[in-house]
Image (cartoon, grey):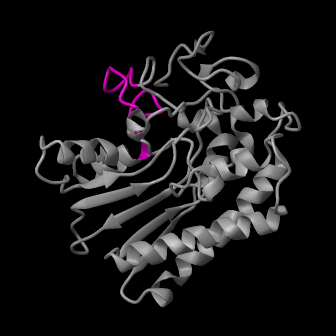
Amino acid sequence: MEKKNLYTTHLLILLVLINLSSSLNVPAIFIFGDSVFDAGNNHFIKNCSVQADFPPYGSTFFHHPTGRFTDGRTVADFISQFIGIGLQQPYLEAQIAVMNGSSKEYPSNGLNFASAGSGVLQGTNKDWSGSNDIFNYFLPLDTPKLDPDAYVEAMVKEVTNLTDQIYKVGARRIVVFSLGPVGCVPARALLPAAPIKRCYGKMNAMVKKYNKGLESLVNDIPTRHPGAIGVYGAVYDTVQHLRAAPTRYGFSNVSSACCGDGPLGGEVQCGKEGYKICQNPQG
């Protein structure tokens, strides 16, 4: 499966399935999403062009590239450490180990299915995320077959289908994160119609409509799936709150990518020829 390399900054947000054996114990997490959660699955996908298995990725925590699109840990890693379980292995890596006999079974602490560049819809290489779908809607490659409202409805329908599927195989604690403000990512510099000095309003309007659909979906989970609990992560509001008062959280620049090049650092991927990196990536 080939995925086009379009991003230098990868936005929230995806879908995490948490399997709880009791109300106080979290033995495993099963993660679905894009580059925000990808722990290295793309490294095992033949001919995949969306990669993070080269420096400076991984430089500040693991001290070597792991396939994560960050200098250290992903959101999923922080969640796992917070609840006290080991980091989830990329599914494709675990699958290879089981198939070649080096491991007898899959890890007991869950698996990470996230894949950078993936999306909710089939045309975006489905792996249950969403930010890439909306970004791709604005690419000047093809005329969209659906208007924005219908496109968002199709995305919500796909996520609904996923929650149905994972419920059938035993999921009872489902956490769905909203998308962040995709119209504010530095990679919007790749879009001819996108403004540089402000966020792309049309894109964020789609994001907010999609998030509203996700929140409604989560609220319906207990009714739709008896015995299940749904939790909605309001990432959009959280990110916008941080953007409005960056210094309060230790940031001096929330407009440009720390690693990349071109306008907003959004035209050249981190680690690729010509990239630049900010002085204090951990700050």
- Give coordinates of residue 163: x percent, y percent: 47, 73
Asked if the stretch drawn in magenta spans residue 67, the answer is yes
- Give coordinates of residue 54: x percent, y percent: 43, 20
Identify the residue shown where x is 30% and y is 50%: 80
Q: Quadrant of residue 58?
A: top left
In this view, 15 is above or below 67: below
- Give coordinates of residue 73: x percent, y percent: 38, 36
Is residue 185 visible to us here?
Answer: yes
Q: Would residue 46 appear left or right of 30 to someone viewing this image? A: right
Q: Would residue 95 appear left or right of 240 to someone viewing this image? A: left
Number of numbered tags placed on the structure image: 0
Looking at the rendering, the stretch of residues picked out in magenta corresponds to 58-75
Is residue 180 visible to us here?
Answer: no
Q: Looking at the image, which residue sits at the far top?
A: 274
Identify the residue shown where x is 43% and y is 42%: 38
Q: Quadrant of residue 27?
A: bottom left
Q: Main secondary structure of the magenta part?
A: loop
Identify the residue shown where x is 45% and y is 45%: 37
Q: Nearer the viewer, residue 266 or 253?
A: 266
